[in-house]
Amino acid sequence: MSLSLTCLCSKLFYLLCVILSFQHHSVHSSFSTANPTGLTLRVAVDDSPGSPLYRIQNLTIDERIEMLINVSNARADYLNLVSSPDAEILPDNIRIPLLREALWYAAEFKIGSQLHQVKLLMDTGGGLIWTQCQPCQNCFRQKLPIYDPRASQTYGTLPCEHRLCKTPGKDHTCVDGVCRYVVRYGGGTSTKGVLSTEAFHFLIDRSSTRPFDAVFGCSNDSSNVFFQNTEISGIFGLSFSPDSMASQFSDQTHSRFSYCFAPIVGAVPPPLVLRFGEDIPTFPSGHLQSTLIMRGPAANSYYYYLELLDISVDSFRIGFPPSTFQFRAGGAGGCLIDSGALFTFIDSGTIGVNAYERVMQVFTAYYGSRSLKKIQGAQGSFEVCYERPPNYEEFASLTFHFNGADYTVAGRYVNVFRPGPTGLSLRASVDDSPGSPLYRIESLTIDERIQRFINITNARANYLHLATVDPDSIRFPIVRDGLWYAVEFAIGSQQHRVKLLLDTGSGLTWTQCLPCQKCFQQRLPIFDPRSSTSYALLSCGHPLCQRTDSAFECEDGRVCIYNARYAGGALTGGLASVDTFHFPADRHRIGSYPDIIYGCSHASQDIFFQNSEVSGIFGLSKQPESFISQFSASRFSYCFAPFDDALPRPLILKFGDDVPRLPPPLVRTTLFVQVPGDTHFHLELLDLSVAQHRIGFPIGTFQVRPDGRGGCVIDSGALITVIDSNTPGVNAYVQVMRVFAAYYGSKGLVRVAPRQDLQLCYQLPPNFKDFATLTFHFNGADYTVAGKFVNYFYPGVFCVAIIDSNVATLLGAWQQQNKRIIYDLGMGALQFSDEICNNDVG
């Protein structure tokens, strides 16, 4: 798999002092000021709940008054912070200890009036400072107590009008006057909660602390966090992002911070120091090198990019062409420094030459000239490994030649050592960690510990690469093929045209591929990956091939495959693959997006869309392999024109800011229901009405049952609506059909025999238009289907387009005609409105 960037990470920082002066295109030496502004932070991570008034109804009158006083005091304390969009935080001297927590360095400090201890992962590639908070909806396990903001008199929530709630490119949503956030990281890690304000208590000398006002994320819902089961409770962001520690305190620190990592494989050192401003040591002339920080692509503008010109192995300078490490179309490429990654990556997709492969060739030649015995596949993702002779220390150094400065890594810190042979690698084969990379690490072998280092770093590379794709700039054409709505785009270097069924109920994106073992009939040519120079197989080490909640699995430790099953016995299987997808970035430009993960299907059976131009499925569920997960898209929307209308031009599947924002009452909103282990879009269905007659189902009729069945799902991949016939206490499908039958019986219509699976059918009198509507009463919103779109029409006959199932209730595509459907994952809600969808064209 081609990696998208070259990344200089913490593995190469042992015993090296790094100073980041983080103003773009500028480098600062020591400042001479009358009032030193040094800042040093000790890393610790914590989280807060959504509001200190949570469950205020349970408090006594005295307790309520005391709570309101506390909140008012907090507002007064933070008046300078939140009263103005340009309000600033004014720290004096601060020192933050850096502690090593297993594989990471974490900042340790205290927050809130109760002086709650937190440890947060120090991350120069991360933005928002966040920690877990009570009350938890979905918290990971941490060894320190979880922060409870209800116990703090200095806690407050960030108002929606604050500048940090309106930062472009951030996934922030205003809910009931409170600014909520969602942050997504590599390997499927995500966290969400409330943007908050709190007193952070930092050391100002060796023994004294002082509170400083800061904005942070109070996380109460996280998943797939890679540092769980440690004392770390969140992330201490130091990137260019305006909500990071570095940015919030930039005016008082002259936009400078510094750290120095002791060797990770050595004994745990006493606390190191994360230094800011004037607290950064000065160096004599000639002892400090400088290189300019570059502005990255728009989607990655918060990272610390450096201008990499060339690379040397030992004393041999490879001589890469000047453009090798430049940014490529689509935002990939470049070189960045990142303390949150553990190992270094060298890009294999560089311009004109495979830089990773060339560097490995030079390392191989170096150790070959010393007659070391090479070992094949000795350590997971490490491809260049050797037996280490007794007392051998002649390891090759590695030098990054930046613009204006050479950064040399001593040979010992280029390699990973294990008993016996030595391994070295500068390539992250993408891998995922199990529940926690550090879980019981003390019981792991050397090989297992090394592999966990690799796993963490690989997830990081995935995150940084995916972040280069801006979902706001993507517009997929939606075309109709028979009874199906499909997205149309191109795959591979030869830009092979495909149409894939738009399916919010599926995660995996897949298409048929040659050579076929058992392919179904499709009218477009079948994609041949052998003709695509950008095609690659997904490695068994990739996170998605390691996860138990994805469609992928590693077969015989050699190849990543997938198997997917659908309703009615349909199934498909093949190879987990990677290729470049080409689709419109705007009305006039086609964007090419490398390293998209999908399934290359070589065998299928009972596929329901065969004999059409549709060759597979475009997955839009919440599964980790879906398109929206790969692109970290927080909002997407579609509008299905009626099936019996002509479609003069394609409709548009919209993402991000391209999704229309409609005011109430034009748009109605209902929250998604989170079902453990289920990635479908569940909705809380309370009742149903037929022709404005509310049936009155008992509370709980449509809830998910203990066996995992039940519930209500919106699903664009289901053609018509399904109503559950196995609901507790009453057969919901039978009850709904009885009301339809009573309605049409009252109209004197003649019932006829069922058509296919549609049980309730009638003769269609000339000019009859009085069709019954169908309303889904969701929690907070009523979704009414016009009578025309409740039914399916045959010559002279119409049938109620609802079928029964004992699995769940599904709101299908047929009943989504002429509706603007918006999936807002940041808000955790479905929005919908009535719309003439034929107008939704590109």
Image (cartoon, helix red, strand yellow):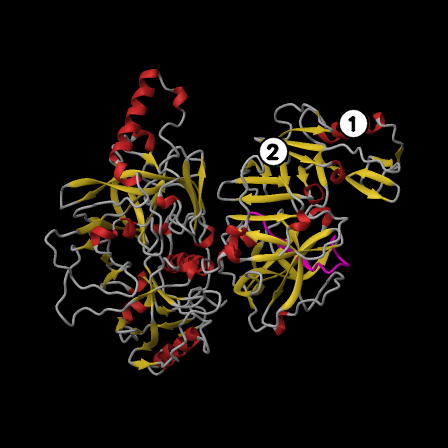
From this viewpoint, is residue 274 visible? no
Q: Quadrant of residue 821?
A: top right
Q: Which three-letter amino acid code belongs to the residue tagged 1? A: Arg
* Residue at 31% across, 24% down: 67
Q: Would you call the spot at circle 2 few (<14 residues within 10 Å), some (14-19), or many (20 or more)?
A: some
The magenta span reads: 607-623
Using the rendered view, name the quadrant where residue 829 is placed: top right
Secondary structure found at label 1: helix
Tag 1 residue = 738
Quadrant in the rendering for residue 815: top right
Residue extending farthest to the bottom is 369
Per the model, the C-alpha gap separating discs 2 and 1 is 24 Å
| Residue 635 in the image, given as x and y percentages of width and height | 53, 48
Image label count: 2
Task: Classify residue 709 as left or right of residue 738.
Answer: left
Asked if residue 627 lies in the magenta stretch, the reply is no
Q: Position of residue 825 (x, y in %)?
A: 51, 44
Q: Which residue is mark 2?
A: 704
Write the residue at 59% across / 42% down: 681
Q: Residue at 58%, 72% (x, y): give it.
A: 493
Which x, y percent locates residue 149?
33, 33
Tell me which amino acid carries mark 2: Val
Local secondary structure at mark 2: loop
- Residue at 28% across, 40% down: 81
Closer-to-camera residue (361/715)? 715
Reply yes or no: does residue 622 show up in magenta. Answer: yes
Tell me the quarter of the image containing the C terminus: bottom right
